[in-house]
Image (cartoon, rainbow, N blue to C red):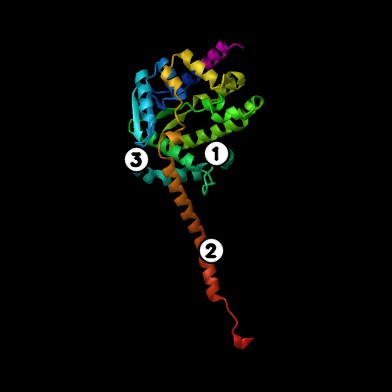
């Protein structure tokens, strides 16, 4: 099948999925200004919606300017939600506990296999998950955030967007998508949906709906990584759709880095992990002390 046919298939499938949703006239889009979220926002606009584009990050985030420029090119409302140190301090325990306590074991096992781990934080959620969770919570809790928020999650998994794909032999790329990238995406979606629900919002992920995954897996990997260009077919689809070139030319940082406070979360979670370990050890130490006080030690006269 020629590339044009695959582009038409992508568009037909994505159109059908978006039209199958019950959406308000102004749904939200979790927005970075990169090709994935911009393509979703642009497609929604072409279908007659006026999505509100929501970006979250610290005051140091370098993604804000670019995302705002893309939003202006699209002619859509843009909201930057600043994640302050106070917000992190007040909500870190909430996000951590929700992810830890409400994530089923099946998802945690996938996380252990597919998520990078940081020293002292070998359990789920790790600092990356908590950082992204804080960003999603900030977006979903914003007063102007619509009840329904749409993401571009899945494009990187389905169309070979990760830098690591350059190191994988071509004949193993399909296996990588099915057995590593998509399971990793499943963790992402569960995490973000859980956090959005905690804020009273619904998260929709059209690129990870069953029918879209099915057609994406039918596209040859030679059209996903072509001329050393990752997500080649997705890029060509965005060009065909008419997405502004400046969104196609820049690769924004992953959300955990783009938010601008990953290191702070790492430090706070390390402290939390140390405190939890100390709390767990306390009863054992108290029992040891009590045993030492009550233990009868023979004296010299009894020997």
Q: Residue at x 60, y 32 (%)?
A: 180
Task: Determine the CA span between mark 3 and mark 2.
Answer: 39 Å
Between the C-alphas of marks 2 and 1, the distance is 32 Å
Q: Quadrant of residue 174?
A: top right
Do we see residue 277 in this rendering? yes
Q: Secondary structure at mark 2?
A: helix
| Image x and y of residue 103, in percent | 52, 41
Q: Earlier in the sequence, mark 3 or mark 2?
A: 3
Which residues fall within the magenta stretch? 1-12
Q: Is residue 219 visible?
A: no
Q: Quarter of the image holding residue 146?
A: top left
In the picture, which quadrant includes the C terminus?
Answer: bottom right
Nearest to the eye among marks 3 and 2: give it.
3
According to the image, label 3 marks what residue?
84
Magenta highlight: main SS: helix
Give the residue at mark 1.
Answer: 115
- Circles 2 and 1: CB atoms closer than 8 Å: no
> With respect to residue 98, does 254 lie above or below?
above
Q: Which x, y percent locates residue 238?
A: 48, 17
- Could you say which quadrant of the image residue 250 lies in? top left
Q: Residue at x 53, y 22 (%)?
A: 231
Where in the figure is residue 132, as x and y percent of width and height? 45, 37
Q: Quick one: SS at disc 3?
A: loop
Nearest to N terminus: mark 2 or mark 1: 1
Q: Tell me which numbered mark, 1 or 3, is placed earlier along the sequence.
A: 3
Residue 142 located within the stretch drawn in magenta:
no
Question: Seen in the image, is 78 located left or right of residue 205?
Answer: left
Q: CA distance from mark 1 to mark 3?
A: 26 Å
Q: Quadrant of the N terminus?
A: top right
């Amino acid at each position: 099948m020629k590339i044009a046919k695959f582009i038409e298939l992508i568009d037909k499938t994505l159109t059908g999925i978006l039209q199958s949703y019950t959406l308000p006239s102004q749904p939200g889009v979790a927005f970075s200004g990169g090709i994935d979220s911009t393509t979703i926002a642009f497609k929604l606009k072409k279908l007659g919606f006026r999505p509100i584009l929501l970006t979250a990050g610290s005051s140091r985030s370098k993604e804000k300017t670019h995302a705002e420029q893309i939003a202006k090119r699209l002619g859509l409302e843009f909201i930057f939600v600043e994640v302050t140190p106070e917000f992190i301090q007040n909500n870190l325990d909430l996000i951590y506990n929700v992810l830890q306590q409400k994530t089923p074991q099946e998802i945690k096992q996938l996380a252990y296999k597919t998520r990078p781990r940081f020293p002292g934080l070998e359990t789920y959620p790790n600092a990356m998950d908590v950082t992204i969770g804080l960003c999603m919570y900030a977006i979903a809790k914003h007063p102007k955030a619509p009840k329904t928020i749409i993401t571009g999650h899945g494009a990187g998994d389905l169309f070979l967007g990760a830098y690591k794909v350059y190191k994988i032999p071509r004949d193993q790329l399909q296996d990588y998508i099915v057995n590593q990238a998509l399971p990793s995406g499943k963790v992402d979606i569960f995490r973000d949906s859980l956090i959005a629900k905690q804020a009273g919002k619904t998260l929709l992920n059209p690129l990870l709906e069953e029918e879209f995954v099915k057609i994406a897996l039918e596209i040859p990997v030679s059209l996903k990584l072509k001329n050393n260009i990752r997500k080649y077919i997705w890029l060509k689809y965005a060009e065909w759709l008419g997405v502004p070139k400046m969104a196609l030319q820049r690769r924004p940082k992953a959300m955990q880095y783009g938010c601008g406070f990953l290191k702070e979360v790492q430090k706070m979670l390390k402290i939390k992990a140390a405190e939890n370990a100390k709390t767990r050890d306390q009863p054992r130490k108290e029992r040891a002390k009590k045993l030492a006080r009550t233990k009868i030690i023979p004296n010299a006269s009894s020997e």
